[in-house]
Image: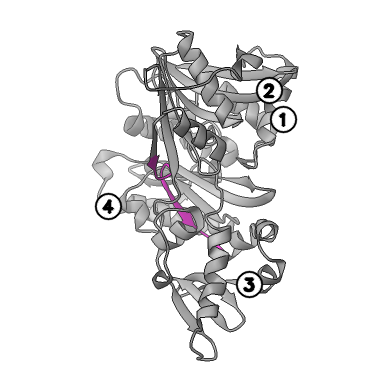
Amino acid sequence: MEGPRAAKIEELPLIEKLSNTVFRSLPGDGQTMFQEFPDLFSVENIENIRVIVEDGIPVSNINYLIRPVSIYGCTVSVASLGAVATLEEYRGRGYASALLDDCIKRMSGQGAQVLLISGNRRLYRNVGSVPAGFMYNFEITLNDNTEVNLSEIEEYTVREIDIENCSSDDFYKLVKLYRNENVRFIRGFDEFRRLLLSRKHLRKIKDEKKIIVAEKNDEFAAYMYMGVNEKNGHIYDCAGSRKLIIETCMKLIKENILKKVNGRLLPYHKEAIEFCKKSNINLKESRLIGTIKIVDFVGFMEAIKQYFYEIYSEEFVDKIEFINDEKGEGFKVGDKKCIVPSKEKLNDLIFGGSKISKEDFLWESEKGDSFRDSDYEEFMNFFEEVFPIPFVDPYSLNYI
């Protein structure tokens, strides 16, 4: 066995063959893994393409990218890991586990604070990557129960953009609209164009890409990147008013351009969530796609501290400290510590999920004093106001 190590450039064709063998073996698959994830498998990312080599060929492979995420102006370093593949005849030897440990150690040294993994299996849970946050899945169809008022959408021009041939003016409008998102992956100008030009998420040959905008007064108010198969659409990426996006979908369905549209809303899309409820559009709550591991808790909390200042008392945020020890991650004020020993509960606290109670924490005093009710309340009031933090949709164009 050779590795874990970085792939060599000359090994990329063999890694593509390995990845396609595992993930692109079904009839109708329309593109290779390298075509769908060009940035992940690029020469520029070669050090983060990790392999184990047996018999002269890569037999197990894990890959990751580290990218910045903006949360209300705070920048967080987020690693996305995926395309975890081992040839069948080499499975059961612990290669994937060895590669995963190698990746986490490396990305930690590279400054990653949060890790997104596209899967949810025991391999990932063993390293503390667990489900986190939640989203609302919606499905829009034309039925008697749906009660959508489309009067507002009539004020907008809804049109499809041919991204391969779109004008510079239209592309700048897309960039401007996306940059107005309060929570987003930070995309470079050229990166955004590459993502829109790609066929990300469009696995099947018959899958058609549509980029649709709602425009008013020569400005884009909403856009969506959608995969369409036999008039059934799935929104993978969008920006602007989510309420307007839902109205746009209903308009396209009423005009028989589409039959059905599926998409997702995050908890901070409050206007759109309320609109769906009033319009009898069914919302199904689920966890975010994949799993999340906080790689550097202290660094992550420090990175979003300005967000805390904007929504909580400056006096308290000034004195709170973030800690990480053998008992878990947590918070400290003065000599009082509040520690979260469970990775699942930590994710529930930070990103949202199951309700957190006082009993889920370890409460310690460096002086050995007992906690007063006011001490508990000081921490719990802070948690209630600042958590869960708004986080990105992992299943966007930046999905790995």
Which element is circle 3 on?
A: strand
Q: Which residue is mark 4?
A: 93
Q: Which mark is residue 331?
A: none
What's drawn in magenta, residue-wise?
A: 285-297
Q: Is residue 304 above or below residue 27?
A: below
Q: Residue at left 48%, top 88%? A: 370
Quick one: label 3, few (<14), some, or many (20+) residues within 10 Å?
some
Q: Residue at x 39, y 56 (%)?
A: 354
Residue 13 placement: quadrant: top left
Location of residue 299 in the rendering, given as x and y in whole percent from the top left corner: 61, 62
Q: Which residue is mark 3?
A: 320
- Select label 1 or label 4 by which is in front: 1
- Residue type at mark 2: give it: Phe
Indicate the amino acid at tag 1.
Answer: Lys
- The answer to which of marks 4 and 3 sits earlier in the sequence is 4
Give how far across and how far down residue 337 sits, in percent. Answer: 53, 78
Numbered disc in front, either 2 or 1: 2
> Which class describes the residues within 10 Å of circle 4: few (<14), some (14-19), or many (20+)?
few
Q: Which residue is mark 1?
A: 176
Specify which label sits upstream in the sequence, 3 or 2: 2
Q: If you read the primary sequence from the N terminus, does the residue marked by circle 2 or circle 4 appear first?
A: 4
2 and 1 marks in contact (CB < 8 Å): yes
